[in-house]
Structure formats: structure tokens, C-alpha cells
Image (cartoon, grey):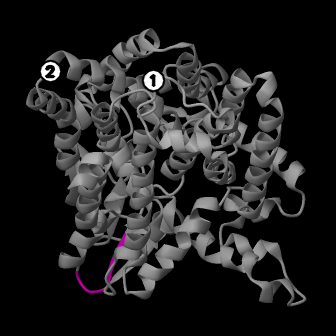
């Protein structure tokens, strides 16, 4: 109990993990997962000495069946995660469920890191409440299971910033005034204790996404702001080691770079900056191409997909945080704010192709919750009574918890009351765009389908096939449309209102929905 009182974040993590262990099997495979996990299985080839010296080593074999699509996507996270996933597989766990559990546990590391970062400026209760708000956002909770790309990048980017700031504090051999976290005092005496994790997290973040170096830039600016004559040599040595180790980690974890590191990194950076795609996106009731979305796309989704208290808490917390800070803290908080503003400004001004909500930019969200913590701390001070503070915190958490329960296991399809909830957002914005509803639809269909039933799947039939019983034949709607006959079945999703274009007059056999929002339907051809 003493340990829990000293480290209250453990309570939150225990609760989260307990809930996750009870529910992780409920999540269906998402559109992007199967081929990405095939990439993970193939990666072992690149790290096999037996293959190196076999005489016919070919790095292309390390990219899996979707090499043309995934080779230039940094695999650092799936390289790390494939080991625990393999262990769970060996114990008999379903592979999709194993990945979902490991993805979720990785996100819990991010919850801890947010708490650790927030604690630099505020009390443990405020940092804990901030971390709980972060962890219990339906958007993030849902993505944490089914998305092996964006939440892991968020986690490692967050770790790179958190440990990077601690590393700089350690190099200066001074504990910044006003810090609440005693662990930072130790970091000041042992700079290597933060340098190694800072470099590791930065390297892994860079290997996951080419935007990873932004974390290193934020850390570098903080370091420059703290350099003095008597610390110049120490800073130079430590930062050189930090940069070298981060580059080494990124290189080791990204086989695609091995043949020509600099040229291929620049190539990937250019490719990902343009992010070419022909995907269509439903936004504000209109279907756009991903590269033709209006500038308001990101601001609108940021307003509608986070719970109602977040933006008011952030706004008040931003003012309070800057007001109460000394000059050193203000530098740090300005860098945290830049972490939010730089990606947002890039999206709004540069207008790169966007799709699947703003999942590629989930990593920009932690600053919202750090600044919200300042508002929470002020609330705790003003209320004075512990139980009143707990009740107010519970009230602020309730929208996220309630809606997560209502939407489960489609929490990532959440829209707040400003958009009319997920029911109100349906047909206006994308909801369950990653087709995880196929699991529920197919499992229900398995119970009633006649022997030899043909199920034509409008998009990504491999997801449905994963859950189909042997008596059902899965067909690809797009390539085998001319073979559909009366009595066959069609599985269609509502992404970009595809259900309105696919046998829309055929009777619906079953649907997967939450509230008034349909996610996918199975129709029988009359």
C-alpha cells in the first residue's frame, strides 16, 4: 500500500491492464493489421546470421508479402513486439488477440510516460488525473488495441521527449526549481541514466515514423537554452553520444536503411511528407479525396473526437502553466506547446493527404493533457477537500468512460456531444473506418449461414476470412462481382457510405451498429 501511495500511477495502470485483459479478445482485426503483422513475421530474416552467410541473402525477403507497401515503413515497434507476441502464440493465444494485447500494454507505457512528464510541473494527484484523462479517451483507448502504427509512435515520441528533457537536466547537474518528481534529482546526478533511454526512444521513434527527429529537435533546443560556459564541454560530449546512439538504434531497427542509410531516409522523408494516396474520406457530409480535404479537417476532428472537458481544461491550463512558471520552466512548456503546434500547423498550412481521422498525428495529443493538468491542479487547490476533488475528477472522466462502454469494442469511432455523438456523426464523418466490425458480423453470420454459403466482401476480404467458419466461402466482391447470384450474401461497410452503393435495396440480414450508427451490414441477394 505504501508503494501505491508513493506511486499512484500504479493504481491507474493496474485498473487499465485489468480492464484490457478482460476485453482485448473483443477487438477485430483492422484494415491495416494482417499485412503489417506479416511484415513482422518476415523481419526475422533480416536478423538471422544463418541467412547472412547462406550465400543468397536478399533483404527483400524481410519485408513480407506487402514489401512494396511496407518496406519503407519503419518496423521498430513490430520488431520489438514480435517477441512477446510470439510467446503468446506459443501459449496457444489467437495471433490477432496476442497483437492486440501487446499493442495495448505498449500504450500503458505511454500512460506512465505522460504521468512522468506532467509530474515535472505539478503534484502527483494532478499528474495522475491528467494521465487518466489521456488513458480514458475513447479515441486513444480504441486505437491502442487495433493500431500497431500510430499509438506506438506516440509512446516512443513521448518517451524521447520525457527522457530527453531529463537528460538535459542531468547534464546541467542541477535540479530545476519547482519540480515535484524526486526521480529527476537522481537523473541530475546520473546523466547517463537518462541519456540511454532518451537515445533509445528517439531512435525507435525515428524508425517508426520519419517525424521522430522532431522529438530530438525539441530536446536539442532545450539543451541549447541551458548551455553555459562551464557546461559546454559536458553538453557537447553527452549530446554527441545521444545523437550517435539514437542514429544507431534507428539504423539497427530499420533494415530498409541498411544498404544506403542517408539516401533512403531522405527518400522516405519525401515520400511520407507527400503521403500519396487515392483514398476517399467522408467529411462534413461530403466525400473528398484524401489530398483535397479542406484546411478545417484537423481542427474539426480535434474538436469533435476528444471528450468535452479537454479543450476547456487545456485553455485554462495553458494560461495557468505559463503564469506560475519560472523562466526555465517556461522554456520547457513552450517546447511542449510547440510539440502540439508544429504538427498542427504543418497539416493546416501544408495540407498533406489525410485519412482515417487524424491517426497519423495522434502523437501531438500529449501536450493537451499536460496543460490540462495545470487546470486540474488549480481545481484541487480551490476545492481543498480530497473527496470533492475526487468527485470532480470522476465527473471529468465520466464522458470518456461512459462512451467507451457504449461503443465497445469500437471506441475509436467516438465523437463527442458537440458532433451529436457517434450517432450524430454518422453519414457526416467517418466512424468505424477500419472495418473491425467484420469480426462481429462474421461471427454472428457463422451461427446462421447455410452450408456452403458464399459471402462476397466489398473490401478487404482477408479480414472477414480470418473469422469465418469452414462452411462459408469468402469471395472478393471487387474481382468476382460478376459471379454473384441470388441467395448469396454481401458484407459491406459504411466507410464513405459504401453501403449506399452496394446492393442498397437488398434486404439486410444482420448489421453491426452502435446507437444509430451502422458500421457494417450483411445483405442477402434476392
In whole angstroms, how far apart are the C-alphas of marks 2 and 1?
21 Å
Label 2 vs label 1, nearer the camera: 1
Locate residue 7 relative to residue 167 in the image: left or right: left
> Badge 2: how crowded within 10 Å, few (<14), some, or many (20+)?
few
Q: Quick check: marks 2 and 1 in contact, CB under 8 Å?
A: no
Q: Which residue is mark 1?
A: 178
Q: Is residue 454 magenta?
A: yes
Whether residue 523 is visible here, answered yes or no, is: no
Which residue occupies 52% across, 22% down?
A: 333
Answer with the quarter of the image where residue 218 lies: top right
> Badge 1: how crowded within 10 Å, few (<14), some, or many (20+)?
some
Residue 213 drawn at (x, y percent): 70, 40
Q: On the rendered image, what quadrant is the C terminus found in?
A: bottom left
Q: Which residue is mark 2?
A: 384
Residue 146 drawn at (x, y percent): 41, 58
Whether residue 404 is visible here, answered yes or no, is: yes
Locate residue 62 relative to residue 494 in the image: left or right: right
Residue 171 drawn at (x, y percent): 68, 37
* Tag 2 secondary structure: loop
Which residue occupies 31% across, 86% down?
A: 471
- Residues 269 and 105: in front is 105
Which residue occupies 88% across, 86% down?
A: 56
- Residues 153 and 4: in front is 4
Q: Is residue 505 magenta?
A: no
Amino acid at each position: 500500500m505504501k508503494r501505491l501511495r508513493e506511486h499512484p500511477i500504479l493504481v491507474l495502470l493496474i485498473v487499465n491492464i485489468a480492464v484490457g485483459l478482460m476485453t482485448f479478445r473483443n477487438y477485430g482485426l483492422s484494415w491495416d493489421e494482417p499485412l503489417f503483422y506479416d511484415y513482422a513475421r518476415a523481419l526475422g530474416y533480416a536478423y538471422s546470421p544463418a541467412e547472412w552467410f547462406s550465400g543468397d541473402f536478399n533483404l527483400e525477403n524481410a519485408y513480407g508479402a506487402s514489401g512494396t507497401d511496407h518496406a519503407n515503413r519503419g518496423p521498430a515497434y513490430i520488431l520489438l513486439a514480435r517477441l512477446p507476441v510470439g510467446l503468446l502464440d506459443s501459449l496457444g493465444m489467437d495471433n490477432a488477440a496476442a497483437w492486440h494485447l501487446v499493442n495495448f500494454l505498449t500504450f500503458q507505457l505511454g500512460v506512465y510516460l505522460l504521468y512522468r512528464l506532467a509530474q515535472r510541473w505539478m503534484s502527483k494527484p494532478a499528474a495522475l488525473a491528467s494521465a487518466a484523462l489521456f488513458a480514458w479517451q475513447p479515441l486513444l483507448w480504441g486505437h491502442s488495441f487495433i493500431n500497431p502504427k500510430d499509438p506506438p509512435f506516440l509512446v516512443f515520441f513521448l518517451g524521447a521527449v520525457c527522457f530527453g528533457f531529463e537528460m538535459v537536466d542531468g547534464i546541467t547537474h542541477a535540479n530545476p526549481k519547482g519540480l515535484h518528481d524526486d526521480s529527476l534529482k537522481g537523473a541530475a546526478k546520473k546523466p547517463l541514466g537518462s541519456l540511454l533511454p532518451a537515445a533509445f526512444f528517439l531512435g525507435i521513434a525515428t524508425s517508426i515514423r520519419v517525424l521522430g527527429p522532431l522529438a530530438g529537435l525539441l530536446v536539442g533546443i532545450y539543451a541549447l537554452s541551458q548551455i553555459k560556459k562551464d557546461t559546454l564541454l559536458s553538453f557537447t560530449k553527452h549530446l554527441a553520444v545521444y545523437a550517435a546512439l539514437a542514429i544507431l538504434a534507428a539504423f539497427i531497427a530499420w533494415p530498409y536503411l541498411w544498404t544506403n542509410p542517408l539516401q533512403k531516409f531522405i527518400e522516405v522523408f519525401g515520400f511520407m511528407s507527400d503521403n500519396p494516396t487515392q483514398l476517399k474520406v467522408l467529411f462534413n457530409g461530403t466525400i473528398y479525396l484524401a489530398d483535397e480535404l479542406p484546411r478545417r479537417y484537423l481542427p474539426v476532428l480535434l474538436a469533435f473526437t476528444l471528450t468535452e472537458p479537454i479543450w476547456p481544461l487545456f485553455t485554462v491550463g495553458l494560461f495557468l502553466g505559463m503564469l506560475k512558471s519560472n523562466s526555465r520552466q517556461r522554456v520547457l512548456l513552450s517546447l511542449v506547446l510547440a510539440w502540439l503546434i508544429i504538427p498542427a500547423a504543418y497539416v493546416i498550412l501544408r495540407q498533406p493527404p489525410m485519412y482515417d481521422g487524424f491517426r497519423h498525428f495522434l502523437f501531438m495529443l500529449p501536450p493537451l493533457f499536460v496543460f490540462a493538468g495545470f487546470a486540474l491542479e488549480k481545481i484541487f487547490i480551490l476545492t481543498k477537500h480530497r473527496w470533492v476533488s475526487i468527485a470532480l475528477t470522476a465527473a471529468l472522466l465520466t464522458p470518456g468512460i461512459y462512451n467507451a462502454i457504449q461503443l465497445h469494442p469500437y471506441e475509436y469511432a467516438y465523437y463527442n456531444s458537440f458532433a451529436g455523438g457517434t450517432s450524430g456523426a454518422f453519414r457526416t464523418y467517418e466512424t468505424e473506418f477500419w472495418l473491425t466490425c467484420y469480426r462481429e458480423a462474421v461471427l454472428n453470420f457463422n451461427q446462421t449461414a447455410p452450408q456452403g454459403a458464399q459471402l462476397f466482401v466489398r473490401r478487404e476480404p482477408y479480414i472477414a476470412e480470418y473469422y469465418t467458419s469452414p462452411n462459408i466461402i469468402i469471395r472478393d466482391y471487387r474481382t468476382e462481382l460478376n459471379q454473384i447470384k441470388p441467395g448469396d450474401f454481401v458484407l459491406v461497410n459504411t466507410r464513405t457510405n459504401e453501403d449506399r452503393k452496394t446492393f442498397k435495396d437488398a434486404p439486410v440480414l444482420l448489421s453491426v451498429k452502435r446507437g444509430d450508427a451502422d458500421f457494417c451490414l450483411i445483405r442477402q441477394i434476392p
